[in-house]
Structures are given as C-alpha cells and as structure tokens.
C-alpha cells in the first residue's frame, strides 16, 4: 500500500533558492525576492512548544507536503504570502518514490 497525502495541495508557496558569494573572505547566502511557485499542504498544529533554561516559548513551525521536487533542499526557504519560513532538517522523499515530499519549516521573524 503506497502513501497518499491526507490533505489537498491547495496552498501556493514560493521556493527561495539561495545563491552564495564570498564577501571579504566570508561565505554569504542571499535569497531572491521572488521564487519558484509550487502548491503544497500547510499545517501548523499550533507550533512547537519549547522549554529552555526555564523559559517557555512556542516556536512557529509547520509541516508541508508537496509533489516531489529535487530543487527543494535543506538550505532553501519557503515563502507563503508575506511570511518566510526556513526548512528544518532534510526534506523526506516519502518511500523513496520521487512522488511526494514532506518537510518541516520554522518561521523567520523578529520578536521576543
């Protein structure tokens, strides 16, 4: 029995692929303002709870599922609307069939 996604790929997202350059001997990543468009499912589950050094916080995380795209890698970012997310870990090629991809993202933003 093969894997089937539980939700439709109804969210439009943009894949931001970084370009690297060296500035004064230090490698620097730059992300484009507009990326490659793709459809996915986006589920947040209310974020991830963390307790570090007695400080409780909720990290804004989500799980994305989409069609397999070899250009989606761990160093990329995903833009949904005006929000930008970084990919946590390596995207999972489900059942190694090059059909579906699943990965976790974390919101990039300031604030306390």
Image: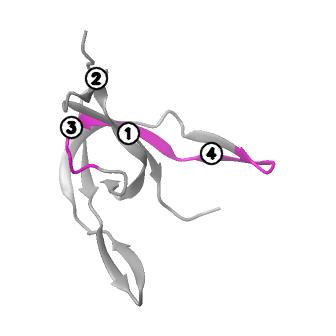
Point out residue 68 in the picture as x, y percentages from the top left corner: 21, 37
Dot in front, 2 or 1: 1
Q: Which residue is mark 4?
A: 58
- Name the residue located 50 percent from the left edge and 33 percent from the top edge: 45
Q: Residues within 10 Å of mark 1 (few under 14, many from 20)?
A: some
Give whichever of discs 3 and 2 has the lower sequence position: 2
Give whichever of discs 4 and 1 has the lower sequence position: 4
Quarter occupied by the N terminus:
top left
Q: Which residue is mark 3?
A: 68
Q: Quadrant of residue 50?
A: top right
Colour scheme of the picture: one colour
Give whichever of discs 4 and 3 has the lower sequence position: 4
Q: Is the stretch drawn in magenta largely helix, strand or loop?
A: strand
Magenta span includes 71 = yes
Q: In the figure, 73 relative to 68: above or below?
A: below
Q: Quadrant of residue 91?
A: top left
Give whichever of discs 3 and 1 has the lower sequence position: 3
Point out residue 84 in the picture as x, y percentages from the top left corner: 38, 57
Give whichever of discs 2 and 4 has the lower sequence position: 2
Q: Real-space Cα distance between discs 3 and 2?
A: 12 Å
Say the numbered circle drawn on residue 5: 2
Say the numbered circle drawn on residue 103: 1
Dot in front, 4 or 1: 1
Q: Residue furthest right?
A: 54
Q: Residues within 10 Å of mark 4 (few under 14, many from 20)?
A: few
């Amino acid at each position: 029995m093969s894997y089937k996604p539980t939700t439709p790929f109804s969210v439009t997202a943009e894949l931001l692929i970084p370009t690297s350059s060296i500035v004064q001997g230090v490698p620097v990543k730059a992300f484009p303002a507009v990326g490659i468009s793709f459809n996915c499912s986006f589920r947040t589950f209310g974020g991830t709870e963390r307790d570090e050094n007695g400080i409780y916080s909720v990290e804004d995380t989500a799980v994305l599922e989409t069609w397999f795209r070899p250009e989606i890698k761990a160093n990329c970012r995903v833009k949904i609307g005006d929000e930008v997310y970084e990919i946590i870990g390596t995207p999972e090629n489900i059942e190694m069939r090059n059909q579906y991809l699943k990965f976790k993202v974390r919101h990039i933003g300031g604030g306390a």
